[in-house]
Image (tube, coloured by chain):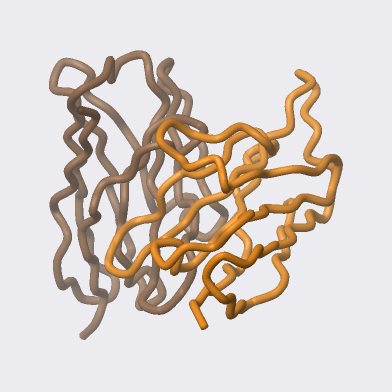
Chain colours: A orange, B brown
Amino acid sequence: DIAVTQTPLSLSVTPGQPASISCKSSQSLLHSDGKTYLYWYLQKAGQPPQLLIYEVSNRFSGVPDRFSGSGSGTDFTLKISRVEAEDVGLYYCMQSTQPPKAFGQGTSLEIK
Amino acid sequence: EVQLVESGGGLVQPGGSLRLSCVASGFTFSSSSMNWVRQAPGKGPEWVSGITSGNAAVYADSVKDRFTVSRDNSKNTLFLQMNSLRAEDTAMYHCAKDRLLEVWGQGTMVTVSS
């Protein structure tokens, strides 16, 4: 099974400053169909996770453009260009290239 | 609006069974793959099972041979039959749409305890 590891596990960021979260997989996430099935989710308090980024770098509908995803192979990054108060929560990456789908441990983002 | 509403959770003794349901609306359910994802209290999400539009099912090793996923396209409903339940199955169970898990329901809580 493919394992996914996130760092850091927690972040404290001043509003308006950037933030970055890393996600590394134990095997390449490049599928034989040429796509890379790496996703990013944000879970706010009391809510289920919500999709932010799909297939490494595509923002889901309604996601602000301050969120961006990048990477390839086994190394991926979620960046927030200017953190806002509403970005507080738990961020998870997930791979869906090979079953079973696997989530990272999560990164807790708090505002300073 | 795409909506997923789960039901069927509750308190069950170890070794018992439960059947969860997820009613979908706002999209063409029959054309969509669907998933069950659970989240134990204070833990991250764990994918449990998925079923394609063609009824092919996949399971996490932790639930294989105990859980069965199915769907009724005429009722826009996804099911999860859970047998031989264990304490470690205690979690909020969410259904989620497509490979992207692009929409999640609010979940139904399953507690396995004597």
Q: How many marks?
A: 0
Q: Indicate the quadrant containing the N terminus of chain B: top left, top right, bottom left or bottom right.
A: top left
Instruction: From the top left corner, tell me how far across and down residue B51 is, in percent.
Output: 43, 30
Residue B27 or residue A99, whichever sits in front: B27
Q: Does residue A50 sit above or below B41 in this rendering?
A: above
Please tell me whether residue B59 is drawn above or below residue A8 in the rendered image: above
- Please identify the quadrant where the C terminus of chain B is shown: bottom left
Residue A41: x and y, percent?
51, 51
Q: Residue at x 28, y 15 (%)?
A: B28
Viewer-proximal residue among A86 and A31: A86
Who's the residue at 58% across and 80% down the image? Answer: A12
Query: Whole-percent x and y of residue B90?
Result: 32, 72
Residue found at x 43% / y 15%: B54
Where is residue A58? Give x, y as percent: 61, 32
Horizontal side of B101 relative to A101 (left or right) equals left
Direction from residue B93 to residue B5 in the image, left or right: left
The image quarter in which residue A23 lies: bottom right
Horizontal arrangement in the rendering, residue B60 relative to residue A75 (left or right): left
Most extreme residue toward the front is A16
Residue at 52% over, 83% down = A112
Asked if B49 appears above or below B11 in the picture, the reply is: above
* Quadrant in the rendering for residue A46: bottom left
Query: Which of the two residues, A57 or B75, is positioned nearer the viewer here?
Result: A57
